Image (tube, helix red, strand yellow):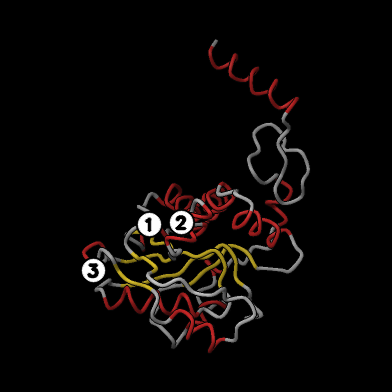
């Protein structure tokens, strides 16, 4: 009886406060959350998790030692991925990160990626930026992955100690110089001999990832792998 009462209340609320897909602005059907089924199916998935020698792995290869590197979707300007990421980062929609993490986490789980990692570490935001935004978008993605892969997401292990300028429109060298000394491992005991999955929202040149990986390897972790929501394969 309580279940049916809840359903009726939910339907009643939806009449006055309809929920919309954050990718296409169409109304969400019953049972859909955040992104409608049609948009979820239309997202440009990379399938990098079934191709070890993928474009992202090749971009980072030789710069830092990695077990694997993967991304859920390809970033395309003026597309649905860009719209979702904009909502995630700037319009107070952390649920986008968690939703995409859960979906991609299921893909990874079906290919036994959960057995290859011990913990999930998000690329950190500076404390002032996180306070202003209210959350770390990479950590929200990590929480979704954590729920599907059944591995902990630890947001307080790797921290950003220096506030950097935005990476937008910077060259690869400028991006590296911008982040090379801004990260710190606050709890190294959590990384010793661990297989770590480092997660980010968008990867372009990989400068931020490279800086984070180096710090975690110095702290004693056994291996590092990478997963992001999106990858800008043009490297721009």
Badge 2 vs badge 3, beta-carbon distance below 8 Å: no
Separation (CA) of disc 2 from disc 3? 22 Å
- Which residue corresponds to mark 3? 193
Counting from the top left corner in percent of width and height, residue 19 is at 70, 36
**Front residue of this view, candidates 46 and 85:** 85
Badge 2 vs badge 1, beta-carbon distance below 8 Å: yes
Q: Nearer the viewer, mark 2 or mark 3?
A: 2
Crowd tier of the residue under label 1, counting other residues whose Cα lies within 10 Å: few below 14, some 14–19, many 20 or above: some
Instruction: Determine if residue 110 is in view.
Output: no
Counting from the top left corner in percent of width and height, residue 16 is at 75, 26
Q: Is residue 182 above or below residue 194?
A: below
Q: In this view, does 93 lie above or below 203?
A: above
- Which residue corresponds to mark 1? 155
Chain-order first, disc 2 or disc 1: 2
Instruction: Determine if residue 89 is in view.
Output: yes
Q: Residue at image x 36%, y 52%? A: 151
Separation (CA) of disc 3 from disc 1? 18 Å
Badge 3 vs badge 1, beta-carbon distance below 8 Å: no
Chain-order first, disc 2 or disc 3: 2
Q: Is residue 149 above or below residue 78?
A: above
Separation (CA) of disc 2 from disc 1? 7 Å
Q: Which mark is residue 139?
A: 2
Determine the secondary structure under disc 2.
helix
Q: Residue at image x 60%, y 66%? A: 230
């Amino acid at each position: 009886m309580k279940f049916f009462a809840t359903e009726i209340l939910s339907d009643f609320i939806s009449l006055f406060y309809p929920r919309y897909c954050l990718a296409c602005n169409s109304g969400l059907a019953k049972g859909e959350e955040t992104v409608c089924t049609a948009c979820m199916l239309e997202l440009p998935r990379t399938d990098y998790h079934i191709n070890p020698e993928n474009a992202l792995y090749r971009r980072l290869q030789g710069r830092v030692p990695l077990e694997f590197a993967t991304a859920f979707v390809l970033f395309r300007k003026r597309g649905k991925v860009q719209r979702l990421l904009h909502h995630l980062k700037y319009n107070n929609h952390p649920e986008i990160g968690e939703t995409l993490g859960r979906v991609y986490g299921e893909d990874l789980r079906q290919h036994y990626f959960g057995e290859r990692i011990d913990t999930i570490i998000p690329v950190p935001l500076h404390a002032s930026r996180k306070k202003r935004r209210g959350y770390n978008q990479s950590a929200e993605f990590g929480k979704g992955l954590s729920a599907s892969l059944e591995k902990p997401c630890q947001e307080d292990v790797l921290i950003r100690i220096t506030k950097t300028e935005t990476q937008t429109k910077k060259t690869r060298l400028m991006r590296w110089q911008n982040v090379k000394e801004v990260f710190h491992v606050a709890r190294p005991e959590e990384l010793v001999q661990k297989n770590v999955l480092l997660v980010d929202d968008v990867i372009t040149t990989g400068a931020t990832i490279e800086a984070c990986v180096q710090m975690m390897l110095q702290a004693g972790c056994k291996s590092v792998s990478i997963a992001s929501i999106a990858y800008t394969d043009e490297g721009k």
